[in-house]
Image: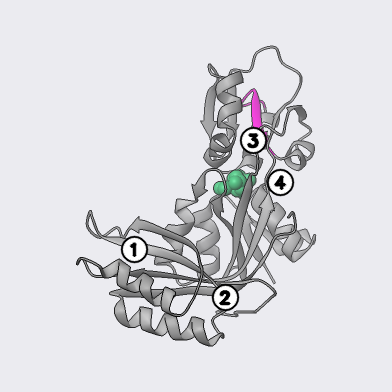
């Protein structure tokens, strides 16, 4: 069994993959981008993929949402991890002029960076562990990454955790097969769009109300067809084999102009 993740080793996606699939490194395929993780699954080069989807400070990971809309993969599990970022470098430095990290990580450390490194050049790269590697190779003065990535690359931790409080990221485990397994806490995710008429969205939301279902997330994104045309990403508390969930989804599907079931899955939060 192979598992694709956003690499290299030491990214938070790696940590999510390792926590869920265990430590056997041969199983894990490091990809350069989130796009590559989805393509690896679609092309059957791995059974599972691990992708970040939403962070408590910075919000949704748009590449992941876009691929969920356009590709034929399912969500089979959610894992929520506490994310702690550190400022790392090869050695203690008087002046740090360049800092590399993933754009999500920069945003999650926004206040610290404004306060301490207003003049530094922030270099956006594909993952925090890639930033750590760049720093180890001398391409930048410092990196923002996990303490694990710092150790892997022989970097010193200069400060941290430097992120905002309560920094958690949701990761999805994705697969080409709709192997939906129920756990203790379950969710179901869909995408729908509706008519461009007064009350259309309200009528769909009324269906969830009628079946007494709790929505844990609703987000609109451009459908990438025409400006002003949107799709709605919705997460629902509950598993698809429960009567109220499956009945509600049948009605929602009937009333939508577009409907896609992304998955029904259990949620694990090992850090909470
Ligand atoms: O760069 C990494 O280490 C990642 O796994 C990516 C990512 C993200 O895109 O959200 C994952 C978790 C953190 O929120 C920051 C970065």
Q: Nearer the viewer, mark 2 or mark 1?
A: 2
Up/down of 175 relative to 39, above or below: below
Q: Earlier in the sequence, mark 4 or mark 2?
A: 4
* 18 is within the stretch colored magenta: no
Residue identifier under label 2:
238
Residue identifier under label 4:
10
Q: Secondary structure at mark 1?
A: strand
Mark 4–mark 1 distance (CA, rounded to whole Å):
34 Å
**From the Cβ of disc 4, is ligand 1 less than 8 Å away?**
yes
Q: Secondary structure at mark 2?
A: loop
In the displayed structure image, the side of residue 167 where residue 210 appears, left or right:
left
Q: Nearer the viewer, mark 3 or mark 2?
A: 2
Residue identifier under label 1:
231
Q: Earlier in the sequence, mark 3 or mark 1?
A: 3
* 144 is within the stretch colored magenta: yes
Q: Earlier in the sequence, mark 2 or mark 1?
A: 1
């Amino acid at each position: 069994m192979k598992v694709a993740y956003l690499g290299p080793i030491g990214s938070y996606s790696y940590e999510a993959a390792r926590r869920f699939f265990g430590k056997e490194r041969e199983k894990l395929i490091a990809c350069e981008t989130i796009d590559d993780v989805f393509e690896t699954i679609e092309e059957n080069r791995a059974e599972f993929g691990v992708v970040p989807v939403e962070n408590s400070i910075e919000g949704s990971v748009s590449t992941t949402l876009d691929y969920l809309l356009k590709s034929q993969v399912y969500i089979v599990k959610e894992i929520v991890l506490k994310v702690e970022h550190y400022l790392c470098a090869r050695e203690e430095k008087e002046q740090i002029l360049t800092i590399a990290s993933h754009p999500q990580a920069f945003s999650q450390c926004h206040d610290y960076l404004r306060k301490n490194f207003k003049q530094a050049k922030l270099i956006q790269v594909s993952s925090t562990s890639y930033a750590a590697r760049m720093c180890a190779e001398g391409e930048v003065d410092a990196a923002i990454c996990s303490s694990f990535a710092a150790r892997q690359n022989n970097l010193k931790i200069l400060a941290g955790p430097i992120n905002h409080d309560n920094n958690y990221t949701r990761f999805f485990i994705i697969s080409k097969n709709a192997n939906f397994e129920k756990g203790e806490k379950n969710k179901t995710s869909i995408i729908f769009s509706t008519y461009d008429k007064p009350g259309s969205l309200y009528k769909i939301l009324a269906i969830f109300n009628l079946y007494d279902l709790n929505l844990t997330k609703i987000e609109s994104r451009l459908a990438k067809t025409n400006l002003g045309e949107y799709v709605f990403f919705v997460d629902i508390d509950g598993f698809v084999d429960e009567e109220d969930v499956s009945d509600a989804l049948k009605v929602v599907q009937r009333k939508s102009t577009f409907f896609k079931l992304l998955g029904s899955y259990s949620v694990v939060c090992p850090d909470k």
